[in-house]
Amino acid sequence: MIRLTHRVLLLMSLTGTYAHAGQYLGELTWEDAERAFAETPIVVIPFGAGAKEHGPHLPMKTDELVLHHLMDAAVKTSNVLVAPPILHGWFPAFRDYPGTEVADPQVFQDYVAEIAQSLVRHGARSLVFLNTGIGRATGLPLSIVAREIRANHDIPTLVVSWDDLETEKADSLYQQKRGGHADEMETSIVLFLRPDLVKMDRAVRDYRAEPVAQIGYAPGKFSRADESGVYGDPTLADAEKGRNMLEHMTANWLLALDQFAVKIR
């Protein structure tokens, strides 16, 4: 089992609840929001797919489920102001499947930029983009926005993507040969968070083509013609693995916020 950081354990009570430290922007009055912008060092812009294919067995809101878990952990343990989540985005690898994609990456990037600039205009002193996609996919337009905000407004920014929250320790939790989407890991996480949404009788093993060594970045794509939308082996999933993985990811997410808070002081 992967242990939570000492800081997280201190903040958690025996019942699993946390000491309150942050706030959700949407739950405040405008007067309270104005004060929160002035008093809170970090504003979080959360992004995760509200409807993106995750194989024949997982809900399309899988990324959103993880996003809300990480948002809640931040609000309960860190001095942050969390903006309403962005649930529609640019998902070119999954374009063949039903879902809700902003297919033009520039439109998505501009949309995120407008949100970020609005938060800056109202007093945000730094921005953290939380991305439950991966860094070299949805993280690309988010990182461009973060760089532009930093360059044009001199506001410190940080982008934290799903793959930033994994480490080699996490690999020890899983048995699959390889994976990366709707696999043993993601299925285990949803079995822990929302088992009622998982259809394990539809889970299929799909390792896709044998990976070939490649220097550089070669974007991937899922096709309905001959693929399930799975990369890995979700049949090996269980809720305990999901709980351990979420603890691991949450600890790294809170550590990232801690490190950023120290940097911007």
Image: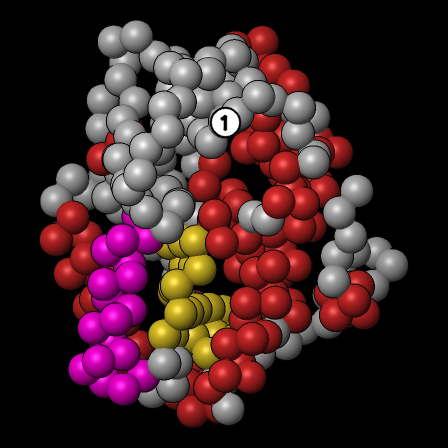
Coloring applied to the structure: secondary structure
Answer yes or no: is residue 32 visible. Answer: no
| Residue at 59%, 49% in the rendered image | 167
Q: Name the side, left or right, on which 194 lies relative to 129.
A: right
Q: Position of residue 73 (x, y in %)?
A: 62, 61
Q: Position of residue 257 (x, y in %)?
A: 54, 71
Q: Position of residue 131 (x, y in %)?
A: 41, 53
Query: Which residue is identified by label 1?
Result: 179
Which is more toward the observer, 232 or 99?
Answer: 232
Position above or below: 137 against 85: above
Answer yes or no: is residue 203 visible. Answer: yes
Which is more toward the observer, 53 or 259?
Answer: 259
Which is more toward the observer, 169 or 106?
Answer: 169
Instruction: Report which quarter residue 212 is drawn in.
Output: top left
Instruction: Report which quarter residue 95 is drawn in.
Output: top left
Q: Name the side, left or right, on which 106 lies relative to 131.
A: left
| Residue at 51%, 21% in the rendered image | 232
Position above or below: 152 against 77: below
Residue 162 colored magenta? no
Q: Name the side, left or right, on which 196 lies relative to 265.
A: right
**Is disc 1 placed on a helix, strand or loop?**
loop
Give the magenta part as a residue range: 138-155
| Residue at 60%, 59% in the rendered image | 252
The chief SS type of the magenta part is helix
